[in-house]
Image (spheres, rainbow, N blue to C red):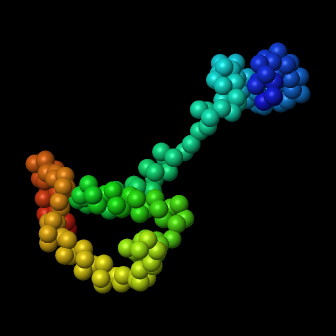
Amino acid sequence: LLTWIRENQKRKVEEWIQEKYARLTERKQNKLQKAWSYLRRNWKGIQERLKETEENIGSSTESHVSHILSARMSSRPMGWSLKGVDHVAQLRIYLKNGRDLSELLLPLKTEGTEGAEKEDEKRCFSAHEILAWEKQKQKKNGKYIEALQATVSRQTGAKFYFQSAIAGIC
């Protein structure tokens, strides 16, 4: 079928469908009828898709990126700086691509003044050191640098206050 569609042999496809149609149950005939109707309506688009050119190659990149980022960005919503969002996004994508995070924590080879390559001392930072660094930067930049600020409407605030008051009574 795909070869006939690719070669624009609509008549052969139609003959094949008619041949199969006669041997099917009523339920399967309805499905085949719907499939043939779809093929007829989308014939040119299907042919283009089957040409296998570079511009027709599809990708699910957008949905993967959305899923990966939303797992961290919205499951535990908080204020983010633009720089922080970018770094977290890059790290999550790096990990999802199967890369080893320790590669990022180890210093890279650097060139010496004579042109020979030297390898810096390999050092992994402990969780304590990373947290200390973050606290130091937090003092400098503030807790929510570049963060979007939001307010709650009076109606929502009143609803929350009312529900809290009732919860305390019940």
- Please indicate, yes or no, whether residue 15 appears anywhere in the rendered image: yes
Whether 54 is drawn above or below 120: the answer is above
Task: Determine the residue positioned at 18% across, 61% down.
Answer: 144
In this image, 1 relative to 118: left or right?
Answer: right
Q: Which residue is drawn at 48% across and 45% down?
A: 62
Q: Residue at x 24, y 80 (%)?
A: 132
At 73% from the left edge and 23% from the top edge, which residue is drawn? 36
Q: In this view, does 103 lie to the left or right of 15?
A: left
Give the percent coordinates (x, y) of residue 69.
40, 55
Q: Which of 76 and 57 is in front in this view?
A: 57
Residue furthest to the front: 114
Residue 23 in the image: x percent, y percent? Answer: 89, 27
Q: In which quarter of the image is residue 14?
A: top right
Q: In this view, does 124 lie to the left or right of 1?
A: left
The N terminus: image quadrant: top right
Q: Which of 14 and 97 is in front in this view?
A: 97
On the rendered image, what quadrant is the C terminus found in? Answer: bottom left
The percent position of residue 57, horizontal first and vertical second, equals: 61, 37
Residue 14 shows in the view:
no
Quick one: which residue is furthest to the top in this view? Answer: 11
Quadrant for residue 40, please give it: top right
| Residue 50 x, y percent position in the rendering | 70, 30
- Position of 102 with respect to 163 (left or right) is right
**Above or below 139: residue 166:** above
